[in-house]
Amino acid sequence: VHTSDFPGNYPGYDDTWDMQKFQKNFRIDVVHLDESSMEFDMVGIDAAIANAFRRILLAEVPTMAIEKVFIYNNTSIVQDEVLAHRLGLVPIKADPRLFEYRNTGEESAEEEGSEIDTIQLQLKIKCSRNPRASKDSSDPRELYLNHMVYSRDIKWVPIGNQADVFADSGIGPVHDDILIAQLRPGQELDIILHCVKGIGKDHAKFSPVATASYRLLPEITLLEPVEGEKAERLKRCFSRGVIDLEDVNGKKELTMSFFNLFFYLLHGNYKETQNPLYCPAALTSTIMKCFEWLVKSFIILFPPGLTGPTSVCLQAQ
Amino acid sequence: MAGEGEKKPVLEMVQADGADEGCVTFVLHDEDHTLGNSLRYMIMKTADVEFCGYTITHPSESKINFRVQTRGGLPATEPLRRGLNELNDVCQHVLNTFQVSLFVHLAHLSPASF
């Protein structure tokens, strides 16, 4: 559905772009914000620009992710390439703004990457038999030591001056409990990992968000007051909380509660509103250019990380 | 957003009609719907633009054909330039508003630390 608010569409109505009008009407309300997800409303902006932000969040905001996997020893049952693929998808907690892109010139051995563009991590783990297990147990958790390789076993190896720069905020995987491989006694992994900066367009592992989505919220205006028994029936059309009855002059009247409008989208009973009985209180639904954004983010860089994406949006222009 | 390494053109102009400067098709390299749709929206909002649209020539090539047609003999580069600047201003304003409302939200949550 294309927008209809361009000049010339409605005769006598000037829809030309006016920065002052936009700035006056535009606002952002943060609904929910925690370490890993964020939800906010943008009022007064068009779908085209909001969608551009969503696309940029997914594909063009850079992050650090494991790119090169140097496998010195892998005697596990997981193949080298499968293991490397899994490791690439592990999210890394590092602020990409403090790093630079790696120069993709010729990939010679000297260009191993310096401290300004590479993070080095190490995964070195060996599974052994637990000498203190009881004779007849069959639980692998009891029988073996280190038989599950989690992301917490990936350790950061600072190179150059990284130890000083990142002393307080350690670098490592975001989550501790991502299962990477399973081992049995005698199998081991000895891997060096290099992380570089990249964007989601190149490979989805570089996307900073688990997902970013938006939806349009409708605006419903009651053209004339609805009272009494009709008001009760109209109220029952919508989910709870969308529409409220107020006592005016002894009769009940309806008031709209804006903030619960999003329930309408999910549970609205559309069939009842077609009933001609509701004509006197004809409802108009216009898309109010109001968006509810749901941004789930991997990165546990608390507020800086979540504002980061938007600032990079501007740079990505 | 030019390509890295070798010099690649970012924007080319392909004139459809010989003399008329108002109808021009631009070829933007390394772009997709992200810039195309938002720029199209901004240019449509400009007065005196008779037609504005974009297509992605083929999904495996990352370039778009962006066409602008103006009324009244205005050269087509003018609404394009204005549209880009206005888009930049919009994004800047959105960024400022976002940072302010984020700050307000955090202050509201933990008034002790502010």
Image (tube, rainbow, N blue to C red):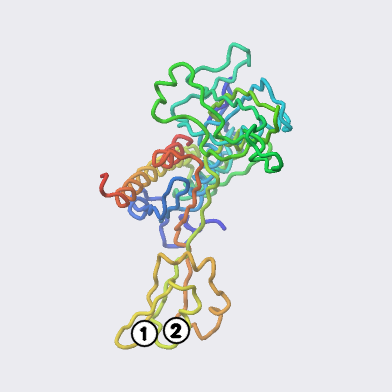
Q: Please report contact status of discs 2 and 1: CB closer than 8 Å, yes or no.
A: yes
Residue beneath the point at 56% across and 74% down: A270
Identify which amino acid the numbered label 1 is placed on: Lys
Q: Where is residue A147 in the image (x, y as percent from the top left)?
A: 65, 35
Query: Vertical placement of A207 versus A105: above or below?
Result: below
| Whole-percent x, y for residue A23 in the image | 34, 50
Q: Which residue is drawn at 54% across and 84% down?
A: A276
Chain letter for the residue marked with disc 1 in the picture: A
In this rendered view, identify the residue nearer to me: A84 or B105: A84
Identify residue for label 1. Answer: A252
Q: Earlier in the sequence, mark 2 or mark 1?
A: 2
Q: Determine which quarter of the picture holds residue A109.
A: top right
- Between B62 and A269, the residue placed more toward the observer is A269
Q: Is residue A223 above or below residue A130?
A: below
Pointer 2 residue: A232
Q: Which residue lies furthest to the top in this view?
A: A110
Residue at mark 2 shares a chain with residue at mark 1: yes
Label of residue A169 in the image: none
The reply, left or right, for residue B86 in relation to residue B64 is: left
Q: Position of residue A64 (x, y in %)?
A: 53, 31
Asked if residue A197 shows in the view, the reply is yes
Q: Is mark 1 on a helix, strand or loop?
A: strand
- Amino acid type of the residue tagged 2 in the rendering: Glu
Mark 1 crowd level (few <14, some 14–19, many ≥20, 10 Å Cα) = some
Q: Where is residue A102 in the image (x, y as percent from the top left)?
A: 54, 22
